[in-house]
Image (cartoon, grey):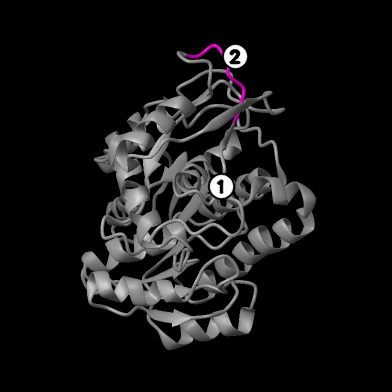
Amino acid sequence: MKECTILVTGGAGYIGSHTVIELLNNNCQVIIVDDLSNSNKKVLDRIEKITGVHPIFYPISICDKDALSLIFTTHKINAVIHFAAFKAVGESVQKPLDYYKNNVSGCLLLLQIMQEYSVKTIVFSSSATVYGQPKEVPVKENSKISPQSPYGFTKMMIEQILTDIYHADKSWNIAILRYFNPVGAHRSGLIGENPNGIPNNLMPYIAQVATGKLDYLQIFGNDYITKDGTGVRDYIHVVDLAIGHIKALKYFDFKSKVGQMITLNLGTGIGCSVLDVVKTFEKASGKSIPYKILPRRSGDVAEYYADATLAKQVLGFQTRFNLDDMCCDTWRWQINNPEGY
């Protein structure tokens, strides 16, 4: 991957910034496009502190055709990693038009410009939300696709667009990566998850309870048929997830005129309950995590974790970090950055 130039949309965000670090560690030139609607420009300085390189940055939206085209005119881009998207499931139910415009229309515009400039390698940030409520676990890549929210449908629609592009032109290299639950932070404590307002996700919520910023954790349901009655999910360290993108890029032969398309789950394949995470975080932080049990939320399932076999077979991808690492790294980020960036 030496001397490759990679465009990373949403590269100032949580997963994007960690992936940029791994790209720079692999001697790639990185160009970040991010409108900073759900990220912070300070992350660029943090990336430079970690890697010694300040990535090229364009503060634009992927929906800005002229600005995006200028980047492709200015730089010789070899591949794109596409993160940029609105990402809150609940908000997508309230603002479906915003989500379809930004996520689907923005990606369409990006793909059209890529085709115009003959940049035919893309790694797409998809989500396990495309599966909806799986009938069996672990969830395999060939499980039924049945999103339950506008956000999930935007990911499904883009997956279909990419599939159709590949069927029409086999010279494209396309990787669709379906994430499970990204958590953790860079071991330096310099970058991590920086949610706006009250966190929607479990780990940053627990971290804010540990610091006293929030009073207690809400656990929705303790009567599931699981080992302790609380919901079970597949948590993957964000650095492992970032490395998965590097492996996907390395999988493609940029010099070949024949492309490939792969669709893979990125998870640990291990289910952890809410109480597993609480107890592990208490150990990592030395803090007590008070919680209250509330009724189940509509649509929640008891267990949801990946079959990660295919990613290992295809990419040689295997996670390195366990739940202890995820909690320790989250806590280090939280105490070093109590108010985020």
The percent position of residue 22, horizontal first and vertical second, equals: 28, 61
At horizontal 64% and vertical 78% (from top left) the residue drawn is 64
Q: Secondary structure at mark 1?
A: loop
- Packing grade of label 1 (10 A; few <14, some 14-19, many >=20) is some
Query: Taking 182 as reference, is 106 above or below it?
Result: below
At horizontal 40% and vertical 58% (from top left) the residue drawn is 192
Mark 1, residue position: 214
Q: Quadrant of residue 112?
A: bottom right
Report the side of 4 relative to 67 (left or right): left
The percent position of residue 126, horizontal first and vertical second, equals: 52, 48
The percent position of residue 232, horizontal first and vertical second, equals: 49, 25
Q: Nearer the viewer, residue 112 or 32?
A: 32
Main secondary structure along the magenta-highlighted residues: loop
Mark 2, residue position: 223
Tag 2 or tag 1, which sits nearer the N-term? 1
At horizontal 52% and vertical 67% (from top left) the residue drawn is 39
Q: Amino acid at mark 2?
A: Asp
The part of the chain drawn in magenta is: 219-226
- In front: label 1 or label 2: 1
Q: Secondary structure at mark 2?
A: loop
The percent position of residue 206, horizontal first and vertical second, equals: 48, 42
Report the side of 328 relative to 181 (left or right): left
Q: Nearer the viewer, residue 136 or 166?
A: 136
Instruction: Say if the magenta span includes residue 129.
Output: no
C-alpha span from label 1 to label 2: 25 Å
- Packing grade of label 2 (10 A; few <14, some 14-19, many >=20) is some
Q: Quadrant of the N terminus?
A: bottom left
